[in-house]
Amino acid sequence: MKYTAKPVVVVVGNGMVGHRFCTRLKAAGGFRIILFGEEPRPAYDRVHLSEYFNGKSAADLSLPMTGWFEDEEIALHLGDPIREIDRERQLVHSSKGLSIRYDYLILATGSSAFVPDLPGVEKEGVFVYRTIEDLEKIKAYAPRAMSGAVMGGGLLGLEAAKALLDLGIPQTHVIEFASRLMPRQIDSAGSHTLESSLKQLGLQLHLNKSTLAIEGRDRIESLQFADDSRLAVDMLVISAGIRPRDELARLAGLTVGTRGGILVNERLQTSDRHIYAIGECALVHGNIYGLVAPGYEMADVVVNNLTGGNKTFPGFDMSTKLKLIGQDVASFGEPFAAEPDCRTIVFEDRHKGVYKRINISPDGKYLLGGVLVGDASAYNILLQTVNNRLVLPPNPEDLILGSRGGAVEGAGVMSLPDEALICSCESVTKAAICSAVMEKEATTIDAMKKCTRAGTGCGGCIPLVKDLISSTLSANGQYVRNVVCEHFNHSRQELFDLVKLHNVRTYDEALTQWGKGDGCEVCKPVLASILASCWNETIVRQATIQDSNDRYLANIQKGGSYSVVPRIPGGEITPEKLIVLGKVAKKYNLYTKITGGQRIDLFGAHVGDLPAIWEELIEAGFESGHAYGKALRTVKSCVGSTWCRFGLHDSVSFAIGIEERYRGIRAPHKLKGGVSGCIRECAEAQSKDFGIIATEKGWNLYVCGNGGSKPQHAQLLAVDIDKETCIKYLDRFLMFYIRTADPLSRTATWLNKMDGGMSYLKNVVINDSLGMAAQWEQEMQALVDSYTCEWKEVVNNPELRKRFVHFVNAPRKKDPGLEFAELRGQVKAQEW
């Protein structure tokens, strides 16, 4: 095949933006494409580069499929950077001696890590964080280091700090010249919240620090700061910003910015009309865009212009959502707007490390921007509200606090205009997604990715895409069935009813009757939960279909050891039982911790020791606390009228009775309860799945609350009821939830998705509008009557005990890989 008749486009730079340009231009057709890359490998996903330390390989991060360049007839030259551009003859000369003529030249050279000119920067143990090769060097050097530091507290710096933590470096420091972390993305209060969370994870932060020198002989030994202080470190990763790679353009005489970057017009043309610049090397409208989404948009603009269009690049919204060392961080719109130009609403929970700020217009009608730290679940809808200038609901604080009793007016995805940009990486609008659902039957995320490419970039839009798929189907009168997986064409609710009606007792029976294939890691735990909820049989008998925690009746912990969590109903425990816990912990060298659920957890157990540990605990009167299962965890209580002068009723006795009633019952997700003896609410009952608060006339019952990363207050179900009525309503409520909730849905999420919300739930539970109350009470009583302690059954059954070994062929041998370190007189898991 001859290519001479086609215009030749040479692309310099094989990063994410260069690759995007090639895919778009090839799809448009009519050009011969020649691609030069400096690195030795094809383009890869730099957005998720840190996942290289979590087990992903270079092949996993690669963007093109094997053979893609050959199939698309794109000439690829790896490890061969362009060293010179001859603009007059329209030629490029590569480092390996190739000379190629071009009709159009695309500079996608990206950026390089900014390395400050410090004495000692050349020493061994000093790295940058930019390419896979950089990461391989860091990974190879890390085993020699006990302490490491990252210079830079911005986005890339915190990513690098996570890499050092993942590599198991015990002491990891972050050094930032500014007075706070991420000063360009989040405000001071948000930064302080982030700092507190990162410190709890073991990071040591050094703010307002100006580094003067890197000290040591041949390798780094310490850092010297301008305030005359020093920090001893074994390695340093420099991540203090980026510099646009404009050296090739400078050499060719193209116009560049005074602070770097190849100057381009709104069509991304340089000062030479045959040469374009895209991505982080381009200076457009006075800005260098350091995110991938605007680079993708630039690539699309140039393709449009080369194929006869006249598209321009007007600028780009730099809103962003990231997960930094496990912490959500997001900013959108105008995050730093201040009065009198706006009115600000702030929510801060220092205990849980959550900070939310939204800036609204002075008239209260529009959202201008905001900052989210610790919980960015609302980011997508908030960003859409800003970008599409949607009118705010009457109570705009609901956007960050939750609806607190109903849906947020006007906040649904279907209220967005058709032109709303849902996926900025791939420029996919709401209209395109809705059209794909109805016209092309793209009703799953995978199908939507294939159809529109939405969600194939950074992935941040996927929650919004899911909501749009479901809402579009519902709006067109189609029943949205949340089927469990490809092996069962049924929802969890349908499978629950089928199991109950047909008296099915095993997973294999269910798979034979209603499934196909061999099952998977999604449907097996779901069926195991349903079988346990229906029949309350010991879940370890279904071990082969369980998650690892249920399989061993214990939560696997960091390093591979397990936790032991006995039930302590209502938080009440005798001195004799406390002594037993202490003796067991000393005998098996376990770490002990009093938890927020008012019980004592023991950590660091070998899997082979679990039956022996539990044998001693059961002999002392303890039972399984079900911390490993999707079941009732605890019913927290205050001391109530037994001791407290403010207590109205005996909250401890009531909490113990409720915990012993519902112990062991499996549900779609974990359950937590609380009982407070007065309105002072010391048991925090309104943050539980069900909470009970004493009144002068009886008890108030609250339901569907939870703490965690998305806290939600429980809502009032019944007022001034007696104990018997309270338990009757709880039976109905819990059975309704167990029967109808989706897998892994907490009660709060279940209620939020329920048509009619709290009014409907009250009607079902209190007024028995479905006529199911008697049946649910009967089913709950059957579960209560059939309860047995799972660990007691294991301890007394030699065959079940045999499962608790690390080596099947050497059952008495313990895991040699478990290592522990000393911590305040106890043990802790050795750092990875």
Image (spheres, grey):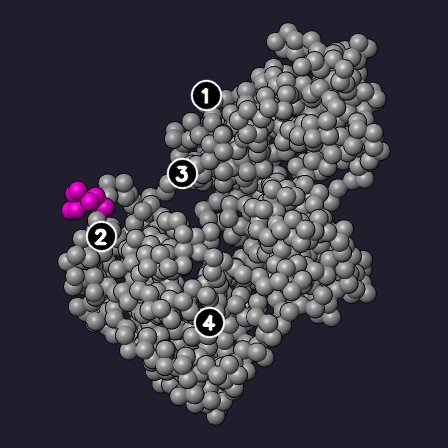
Q: Is residue 247 above or below residue 56?
A: above
The residue labelled by disc 3 is 168
Q: Earlier in the sequence, mark 2 or mark 1?
A: 1
- The 10 Å Cα crowd at callout 1, few under 14, some 14 to 19, many 20 or more, is few
Of the two numbered discs 1 and 3 in the rendering, the one whose residue sits closer to the viewer: 3
The question of residue 812 being in magenta is answered with yes
Q: Amino acid at mark 4?
A: Tyr
Counting from the top left corner in percent of width and height, residue 321 is at 62, 48
- Predominant SS of the magenta segment: loop
Q: Earlier in the sequence, mark 4 or mark 3?
A: 3
Horizontal side of 632 relative to 32 (left or right) equals left
**What is the span of residues highlighted in magenta in the rendered image?**
806-813
Foreground of the two, 528 or 804? 528
Query: Mark 2 and 1 residues: CB-CB less than 8 Å, in contact?
Result: no
Counting from the top left corner in percent of width and height, residue 483 is at 49, 58
Query: Mark 4 and 2 residues: CB-CB less than 8 Å, in contact?
Result: no
Is residue 727 at least partly visible in the picture?
yes
Helix or strand or loop: what does disc 3 sit on? loop
Residue 75 picture quarter = top right
Alpha carbons under labels 2 and 1: distance apart: 52 Å
Horizontal side of 568 relative to 773 (left or right) equals left
Q: Which mark is residue 291?
A: none
Q: Which mark is residue 737?
A: 4
Q: Earlier in the sequence, mark 3 or mark 2?
A: 3
Residue beneath the point at 49% across and 29% down: 58
- The 10 Å Cα crowd at callout 4, few under 14, some 14 to 19, many 20 or more, is some
Residue beneath the point at 46% across and 53% down: 485
Q: Which mark is residue 217?
A: 1
Horizontal side of 526 relative to 15 (left or right) equals left
Helix or strand or loop: what does disc 2 sit on? loop
